[in-house]
């Protein structure tokens, strides 16, 4: 059974780059799964920020708003799964997480 503290730490992993602080604890397999998910999601946030800021017009009016809504949905999806104690992969990017070896 997964405790409330672990579920809370699992949810924190989805806030971009906060997964690094959870790495300093002794992570359980549940936390390792959510750390990997948070790592991939943080990387995708970085790509989105780059595209949003450096591609004129398309980035500002298309990639920016739609990408933000999509990434915000993924962040909330991961946090809700972690708080509920589930180990479900993120939609569309869960395949990348399974390939990571940390």
Image (cartoon, rainbow, N blue to C red):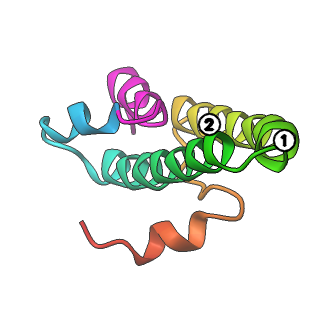
Q: Is residue 32 left or right of residue 40?
A: left
Closer to us: 54 or 45: 54
Count of labels shown?
Answer: 2
Q: Which mark is residue 19?
A: none
Q: Report if residue 78 lies within the magenta region.
A: no
The magenta-colored residue range is 1-17
Measured from the top left, where is residue 56 in percent x and y?
76, 45
Measured from the top left, where is residue 26 in percent x and y?
13, 41
User: Mark 2 and 1 residues: CB-CB less than 8 Å, in contact?
Assistant: no
Measured from the top left, where is residue 55 in percent x and y?
70, 50
Q: Report if residue 12 lies within the magenta region.
A: yes
* Crowding near the residue tagged with mark 2, few <14, some 14–19, many ≥20 C-alpha atoms within 10 Å: many
Q: Is residue 43 left or right of residue 35?
A: right
Q: Earlier in the sequence, mark 2 or mark 1?
A: 1
Q: Up-down: is 67 above or below 72?
A: below
Quadrant of the frame with the C terminus: bottom left
Closer to us: 3 or 93: 93
Q: Tag 1, which secondary structure?
A: helix
Residue drawn where x is 62% and y is 36% of the image: 75
Residue drawn where x is 41% and y is 23% of the image: 8
Residue occupied by mark 1? 66
Which quadrant holds residue 23? top left
Q: CA distance from mark 2 to mark 1?
A: 14 Å
Q: Is residue 77 left or right of residue 20?
A: right
Residue drawn where x is 33% and y is 38% of the image: 19
Residue drawn where x is 76% and y is 38% of the image: 64
Looking at the image, the residue that sits furthest to the front is 56
Residue occupied by mark 2? 75
């Amino acid at each position: 059974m997964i405790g409330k503290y672990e579920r809370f730490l699992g949810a924190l992993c989805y806030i971009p780059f906060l997964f690094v602080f959870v790495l300093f604890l002794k992570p359980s397999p549940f936390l390792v799964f959510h750390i990997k998910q948070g790592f991939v999601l943080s990387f995708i946030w970085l790509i989105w920020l780059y595209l949003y800021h450096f591609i004129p017009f398309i980035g500002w009016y298309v990639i920016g708003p739609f990408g933000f809504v999509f990434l915000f949905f993924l962040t909330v999806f991961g946090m809700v799964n972690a708080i509920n104690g589930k180990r479900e992969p993120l939609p569309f990017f869960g395949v990348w997480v399974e390939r990571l070896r940390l």
